[in-house]
Image (tube, rainbow, N blue to C red):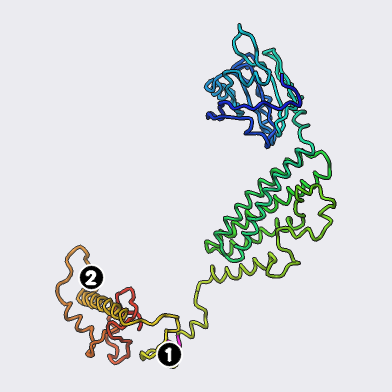
Amino acid sequence: MIGDGDEAPAFSLPAVEGGDFRDVALEDYLGEDIIILAFYPADFNPCCDGETTDLDELDLFTMQKDVSIVGISGDSVYSHRAFAERYDLHIPLLADVDGDVARAYGVAVDDPDAGFRTNRAVVVIDPDGTVQYAWQTEKLTRLPPVDDVRRAVENIGGGDAAEARYRVGHAHYVEGRRAFTSAMGEFTDMEWMMAQGDFRRAREEFDEAADQFNTAVRFAVDETPRTYFERAEAKADALSQAAEWLAASASAYASGEGAEGETLRSDAERPLETARDIHEPPDPDDFPPEEDPAEQDDDRTSILPTDDDSPAATLDADLDDTDAAAGSDLQQTDPVPADAGTASAADSAEQTDGTAGGDGDDEADDDGGDEIDDEELEEIAAELEEQTKRAQADRAAEQDEPSGAVEDTSGPEPAGGDTEAAEDALADDGTFDLADPTEDEDDEDEDDDTDTDTAPVGDGADTGSHGVPDSL
């Protein structure tokens, strides 16, 4: 049988897991997990009593972080699926129907009379692919020594394995830092959707980094490296939480919910303060550091702005400025400033006689509109003439309709009265009466000499909801 210190033979076999068929290879786990290969004689073997199997205690190792269990026997994937469903097994069961993997590991039964069969055996492999524990028995009813397997798993690790996990975690942390820094700039510039996406990406990277740092903590042998790994995990966790809340804050601002965005941004300050108090994880290439980074004030700058930076670079200043800008952009109910409204009213009062404000130059209006050339003016005039005709017809129809009557939209339109009403709507000078066509009939008794804004048809004015020009 293969022994401790040997390189584990590679393999790839069809398997069933969770009722689904897939291929499983040893390399799927190398570099990430400790692998426990559980060879067993067959599905539904004599150790299976209807309630438990010979794999149940090993199956519990799936609850341990960074440990993967793989069951292997000579049965087909279809037999494996029925076996897993009957006993609620969650580990992948590999079908070594030709016995190639069992022979490579030295656990195959060479008995021509019994046919191909696998001995019960357990092989523990470290993330580098080296066998750290091996056991087998030819007795069908003997179960694996679970305590020995557990100790073998606990002993795997040491400095090399811990630092390897730390290196992986640091790579994810760096990616998270880049995304977080980019998101902070976008948040400050009120680019809410971009900030939201980068904060979410940062959170994913920080979560993965924290997971790898946690594994490094458990694998660490010496206290000093373990301390660094724990700090790195705490910082990654804090930044992950901050990134989550800032992503939600950016989403709220993008939806116009300024108050909610400010609340979430304030919530993010707590984990950010925690992260500020922890030094940056040391570079794996310089690990362990000669001096404790926690004792070096200049190492606490981290990826976050600090009070030592310029006001524009501090987190508080950036986010507060963002909130102020966001408040004007997202929460302001009246987009026109009060003084601007007053000025506009004054300009309108000055221009009721049809003259432009200011010095009378033929320049663009104060609202920044461009001058209209002759071709555009002709197009506008044609459009307004058409709108005027429609307005005249609508007004004539309203005058002919009896008071209180409900318009019947299903029948033909009234045939009479349109021409007379249209003529009444025109002043003697050929201009169109701009009086509100929806005014009450009582208003007709008012003085006919009251000034009303009029404009020649086709003067380039905009039209309102009634097809009538609103202004000159």
Secondary structure under the numbered disc 1 in the rendered image: loop
State the residue in front, 444 or 69. Answer: 69
Quarter of the image where one finds residue 366:
bottom left
Residue at x 52% of width, y 22% of height: 78
Type of amino acid under label 1: Gly
The region drawn magenta spans 345-350
State the residue in front, 81 or 219. Answer: 219
Placement of 207 over or under 400, stated as above or below: above
Q: Quadrant of the N terminus?
A: top right
- Image coordinates of residue 290 in percent, x first then y, are 84, 51
Any mark on residue 405, and which?
Answer: 2
Mark 1, residue position: 357
- Image coordinates of residue 185 in percent, x first then y, are 62, 63
Give the main secondary structure, helix, strand or loop, of the magenta stretch: helix
Asked whether the residues under the numbered discs 1 and 2 touch, taking CB atoms below 8 Å apart as contact, a structural biologist would say no
Type of amino acid under label 2: Ala
Secondary structure under the numbered disc 2 in the rendered image: loop
Quarter of the image where one finds residue 46:
top right
Residue at x 70% of width, y 43% of height: 212
Placement of 268 over or under 98, stated as above or below: below
Placement of 334 over or under 9, stated as above or below: below
Placement of 425 over or under 117, stated as above or below: below
33 sits left or right of 347 in the view: right
State the residue in front, 434 or 141. Answer: 141
Any mark on residue 159, and which?
Answer: none
